[in-house]
Image (tube, grey):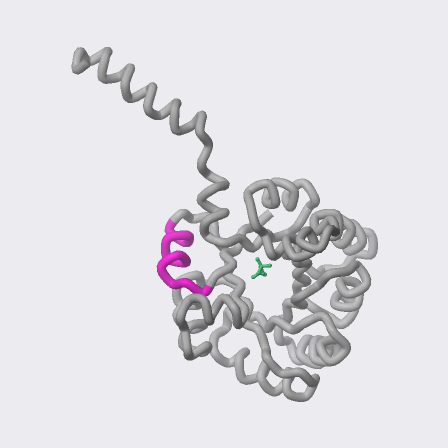
Amino acid sequence: MRLYLDTAEIDLIRKGVKLGVISGVTTNPSLVYKAGWTDYKSAVQEICSIVKGPVSVEVLGQESKSMIKEARAMAKWSEHVVIKIPACEAGLEAISALSNEGIRVNMTLCFSLNQALLGALAGAAYVSPFVGRLDDVGENGMALVADIVSCFSRYGFSTQVIAASIRHPLHCVAAAQAGAHIATVPYGVLIQMVNHPLTTVGIARFLEDAQKAAGKV
Ligand code: G3P
């Protein structure tokens, strides 16, 4: 499973990329707003210059025609741009048209196996089931990820599954167990993934014993 960062905050992206474990970034209008960007294009170009991997950028159009127009313009921002299109009727038409033009699409706001199946059939390069938001309404978000992965594998679809709306490190464990190709995680969750109290205690104890052995304590 690969890891993307789910943020538009440049400092966090720089820090994550330095760790050598991040191969892409996902953004959405809420994350761009939260990061204080007013110019989406500049934000995306800056992110692309840091991560040099797929960077998902979301359209705001509500109809297929406006989604396609926006997406074509966004795709020119950088070779790394992947267009996020919501899982709705207009979105499907846009996914199909853009995929036929060779523009990579990430079907976002995906909450069902049917939506994911349609996204794959329309040619999406990625589908993003929103795990945390399904959990929020009492459904099992990770069960959906597992269902999509197994369905895509059964039918030989090349569409990759991005476990999105990840809220905590256990989601990452479950995404890996479910076979997600990618989990897109907030920076805080990335750091929670590496931290373990026994590692912290172990480092301190080794240091202490080494100092004792050297007669420094
Ligand atoms: O990747 C999708 C993500 O940005 C949504 O996360 O926590 O707002 O449901 P959340």
The magenta region covers 8-18
Residue 199 magenta: no
What percent of the width, then of the height, locates residue 5?
Answer: 49, 56
**Residue appearing at x 27%, y 18% in the figure:** 208
Q: Residue furthest front?
A: 137
What percent of the width, then of the height, locates residue 113?
Answer: 79, 59
What percent of the width, then of the height, locates residue 72?
Answer: 58, 83
Foreground: 95 or 109? 109
Determine whether 149 is above or below 211 in the image.
below
**Residue appearing at x 61%, y 45% in the figure:** 171
Foreground: 62 or 128? 62
Instruction: Say which quadrant the C terminus sits in.
Output: top left
Question: Toward which corner of the image does residue 12 lie, by quadrant?
Answer: bottom left
What percent of the width, then of the height, locates residue 141?
Answer: 70, 51
Left or right, 211 with reference to 46: left
Question: Toward which corner of the image does residue 203 lie, by quadrant?
Answer: top left
Q: Main secondary structure of the magenta part?
A: helix
**Residue appearing at x 53%, y 72% in the figure:** 29
**Residue appearing at x 77%, y 77% in the figure:** 89
Determine whether 129 is above or below 84 in the image.
above
Residue 11 magenta: yes
Left or right, 154 with reference to 105: right
Instruction: Answer with the quadrant where ligand 1 appears in the image.
Output: bottom right
